[in-house]
Amino acid sequence: MDDEQRDPGDLPALEERSDAWLVGRARELLAVIQVSPVAERIRHTDEVDRLLAEAQHRGEPRMVAQLLRSAVAVRVVNNELADTAEPLLDELLAHTRRHGLVVLQADAHALRGRRLLLAGAEDAALTEAAVALAMLDEDMTPDVLLGGRNWDMIMAATLMDIGTVLTQLGVYEVADQVMARANKCIRASAGPHLISVHLINRARLLVGWGLRLERIGEDERAAERFATAAAIAVAVEAPFRESLFPRDPNLSAADQNPIIGAALALAQPSGAHINRLQRLSASMRYPRELVIVAVALARCLEHEGREDESVDVLGEARSRMYHEAAEPTLRLCLIREYARLSGPEGGERTTGALEHYATELEAQLWDMRESRIATLNTRREHERLSRMHGAIARQALQDPLTGLPNRRALDERLETLAGSPANHPLAVALVDLDGFKGVNDRMSHAEGDDVLRVVASTLRDALRGSDMVARYGGDEFIVLLPGAPLTAAEAALRRALTAVAGLPPDLSHGVTLSIGVVSLRPQETAVRALARADAAMYQAKRGGGNDIVAIHAGEGDGTAEDGKPDTDRVDGERLDPAWVLPETT
């Protein structure tokens, strides 16, 4: 018996579940919620929120981002809760920006685009899609902490969310390119569910594109789109049977999914599809499904000579879509189909005039489509250039290997913090990697670079947002902790030290940290503070490494209270008085 069928009281507590289980359960709920009644959708959304709360309690940034994404997505597909998505969207954007999770940040923009479309804000939704595309136009280096398969799945989901926004806006050509890019990620790593989602989205794109082409008289091209959508409807059967979607194992995907059933009917309208489409139309939850199934059913009824029934089907759908802000392009397709089949009472002459007017109207709308594509490309290029400019500015202050601030950025930040009393006490730590040289010697410098990246990311994630982690050079890092007394700074750095020590061996190759931390003294220079932190770090290293030495005022740091070298100390260690030579007079 699976978790979905068990009584919740029989399930282990969330704190007993693995990180992967939390993420997987959220994906499962997102699939279930799309075909559930309203009451169940609300219940499932509450469960996703509980999963998010557990992830936030654990604090792993990538897991939190994925659960935030799920909490937003379940609301965006649920009209009753769509208004509650906005605060979570803001949180997802802030979280992904802070942790440099660019793909999930792009997905946040795509999900905001979907949210805006529900409110009829098409232009704003187009801007969000352009921003998301520009972010993914950059060179994307897979996040080693996510793992290759999970990285591909997140990238594919983000591209599909962008493609969905573009499909709803009627920008089918660009949506098709985005979906093709998603397909490459899916081929590499996806399981049956993600394959099913992709094929259904692709079929929906092609059906909408075909209906749009018919409106400008491009019937042959439209037929090609319908035929391809039908081929996809056949191909989805196998993965659909193993997907996360709730389903009847005795029925085909075409009998259970409106888009798949309609795709087969539009390619070859006939009476064979009528009963299936009538059953599907009784369970419509989304405008896109309503329009596509209504048009497909009407054409099958028309094929059988049942024109009056086809008009009734379209009229009912038209009434239900009257106040619907979303899916403007599909709504126009529905109105056109209704006009085509119903016809005015004035006979052929009036019909001909209306068709002529419709043709002119469609030509103008087609020009608007070209303008929309141009607008999308312009905004995408603007965003790309803006990000490139920002990237160039960041590169001057950024270590290219780890993405952390470099020494120049460190110097500027330390000067700023030291000069502001509000930031005191200010803790300064020097971090050195134990065993790093052995990684380079035993393996390769490429492996060593991966270790540096993983350690840098782990160190950054373990500290506060206001703390600064900079690469000082080689395998050394500097940490600035403004407003942190030395005891608090030592505790925070110990969390980082523990996190690195606990990394999987295939990521860290056994590397640990030696850390020295001091508190900046009044009137002390940055050079002197770093020298004291360096001395403390060497004390930690001499003790065997994987440790922290925090030097308080007056302790053995190699300097006296006035900041001058302590003549009774060498390398931070007090000398026996018998070994100190007397001064000569």
Image: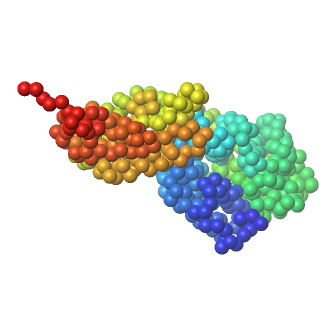
Location of residue 139 by image quarter: top right
Taking the image as shown, residue 347 lies to the left or right of residue 532, namely right
Classify residue 561 by image quadrant.
top left
Q: Position of residue 442 (x, y in %)?
A: 58, 28
Looking at the image, is 415 positioned above or below residue 330? above
Residue 78 image position (x, y, % from top left): 63, 60
Q: Nearer the viewer, residue 371 or 162?
A: 162
Residue 393 is situated, as x and y percent measured from the top left of the image, at 41, 29
The residue closer to the viewer here, 339 or 235, is 235
Pick the residue in front: 305 or 59: 59
As displayed, is residue 43 above or below residue 435?
A: below
- Residue displayed at 69% across by 57% down: 28
Give the total number of marks visible in the rendering: 0
Q: Is residue 397 above or below residue 246?
A: above
Q: Nearer the viewer, residue 520 or 334?
A: 520
- Residue 541 in sight in this render: yes
Tell me what residue is drawn at x 50 percent, y 29 percent: 437
Where, quadrant-wise, is the N terminus in this rendering? bottom right
Tell me residue 200's x, y (percent): 76, 48
Residue 101 in the image: above or below residue 80: above
